[in-house]
Image (cartoon, helix red, strand yellow):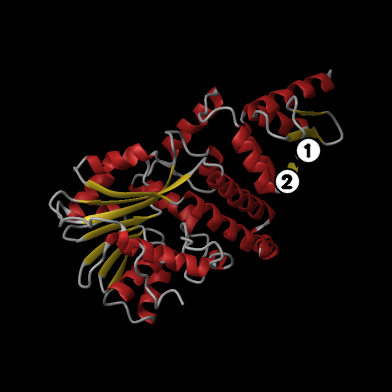
Amino acid sequence: MGGVFDQWLLRKICDSIGAAPVRIEIEGGASDAAPGVSPEFTVYIRDRKTLRELVLDPEVGFGEAYSDGRVRVEGDLTRFLEAVYRSWPSGENRGWHARAVSAWLELWQNNSLRGSRKNIHHHYDLGNDFYRLWLDRQLVYTCAYYPSPEMSLEDAQIAKMDHVCRKLQLQPGESVVEAGCGWGALALHMARHYGVRVKAFNISHEQIEWAQRRAEDEGLARQVEFIEDDYRNISSGFDVFVSVGMLEHVGRKHYAEFAGVIHRAIGKRGRGLLHFIGRSYRNPFSRWIRKRIFPGAYAPALAEAMEILERYRYDVLDVENLRLHYAHTCEQWLDRFENVRAAITAKYGDWFARAWRLYLAGSVAGFSTDTLQLFQIVFAGPHSPPPAMTRAHLYESQCESSIS
């Protein structure tokens, strides 16, 4: 009887992931694959308890079981995830359990003033030494920009920062406010190469301390002020608003607040840029990622981001999708992570290392298969100076001193 029931459960899992070239096997027991496919990967499940968890919620069940070591994947993990993402039957989570988990996470991880601090602390305050193991030298933890595919991660992150600055057409003496500044690389780049004054907000204590030390060491503390505070406390009177990699942490329930902050900061005469992970459709973010890696995360559809700007009638001047750039960025992060995985396991434990390996491989797969997008939107107030007639300024010159 047990064998028949196991086979039925395996069939349910295969049905849930569609026609992926995957064979699923209980170690030492039954196995199954989608009809008519030639399996390229094998997923080994340790026990019947894990099998039941995968049937109830394939996404969260797989994430938990892989991190625990109760599931093994034979074959390249990233390519396996890409195959599953491409075959997944629906872009929506329709099961009752998935809907219940999403609703609970939205309630528990609400990005209120207190909730945001808790959510950000969970991910960004793991310790600067951890991120130094596999990010670039400046600790830029957002999508890089590759004018050529052979460019190093370090140079591609500098190219991204310069791409942002050229899009904003920064002028010496202007005032810029940055919402969510990471370890401070963009704020320092803007000040050093474009002569602007920057106030940069972040609620990660470890990131802010790192950024403040960099500003002092590089003689930029008078031009750049790093402030450990919530973006909702940004004041008025700036020429430019920029947010790179933070909209994902705002939460759709707080978009009206976010729009109000932008309007207070730059009014009707300023301009700005939003850089964020998004989707081609509206859908909750990965439940496992929200549970274990990025609490409170939400990747908006482009239309949802546009609604933020429509609220105060901002003109949208430019929209670019850098999805393939982020896939390549994540590939380079994953390669670096794999090279130091033994050290990460020794310091943080096997569960942590396996969970982060899955997160990074899943990120590569998400961007390479069109499941996730990376949008940059340039906008300006209705009373701002006339925009450039063409996009030539993005490509005619680069910050030669920064890419060398």
Which is more toward the observer, 244 or 315?
315
Residue shown at the point (26%, 63%) measured from the top left: 169
Residue shown at the point (47%, 58%) measured from the top left: 124
Query: Is residue 366 rendered to the left or right of residue 199?
Result: right
- Disc 1 marks a residue whose amino acid type is Arg
Tag 1 residue:
46
Pointer 2 local density, CA inside 10 Å: few below 14, some 14–19, many at least 20: some
Percent of width and height locating residue 172: 22, 72
Question: At numbered mark 1, what does the secondary structure look like: helix, strand or loop?
Answer: loop
- Disc 2 marks a residue whose amino acid type is Gly
Residue shown at the point (63%, 60%) measured from the top left: 335
Tag 2 residue:
69
Residue shown at the point (55%, 44%) measured from the top left: 366
Query: Is residue 75 rendered to the left or right of residue 110?
Result: right
Q: Are marks 2 and 1 in contact (CB under 8 Å)?
A: yes
Residue 359 in sight: yes
Mark number, residue 372: none
Percent of width and height locating residue 401: 39, 78
Pointer 1 local density, CA inside 10 Å: few below 14, some 14–19, many at least 20: some
